[in-house]
Image (cartoon, grey):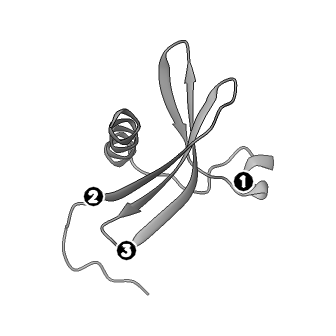
Amino acid sequence: MITIKDNKAIDVTDVRIRKIKSKNLIAIASITLNNELIINDINVSCVDGVINIKLPNSEFAENNRQYSIIPQRKLFHKIKKAIIEKLNA
């Protein structure tokens, strides 16, 4: 059982980018949250000038039209913003 004792914000503390030369896929990203949790294999694509990210899914999740990782909207935007900033650096 996990007990949450405080309401600390989750922050993106590291971003790593591996650029890809493909039609729409422009990079694969890995992020670290609060120096504790690493999420690898985030697809970064660009379609019509708009950068999008897709968090990794297991095969089971994809077959059942689900997601493996589901951040709340605020955290998703933090992740996306950090990845875009790293791409533009």
Tell me the amino acid under the disc marked 2: Asp
Q: Is residue 69 left or right of residue 57?
A: left
Kindly identify which numbered label has been placed on residue 61.
1
- Counting residues from the start of the chain, the first of labels 3 and 2 encountered is 2
Residue at 81 percent across and 48 percent down: it is 63
Say which element carries label 2. Answer: loop
Q: Which circle marks residue 36 in the picture?
A: 3
Of label 3 and label 1, which has the lower sequence position? 3
Q: Which residue is mark 2?
A: 11
Image point (32%, 71%), residue name: 35
The residue carrying pointer 3 sits among few (fewer than 14), some (14 to 19) or many (20 or more) residues within 10 Å by Cα, namely few
> Alpha-carbon distance for marks 2 and 1?
26 Å
Q: Answer few, some or many: residues within 10 Å of disc 2's Cα (few below 14, many 20 plus, some between 14 and 19).
A: some
Residue under the point 36% across and 42% down: 86
Q: Is residue 26 above or below residue 33?
A: above
Q: Residue at x 72, y 58 (%)?
A: 58
Q: Earlier in the sequence, mark 2 or mark 1?
A: 2
Query: Relative to 10, is 41 on the left or the right?
Result: right
Q: Amino acid at mark 3?
A: Glu
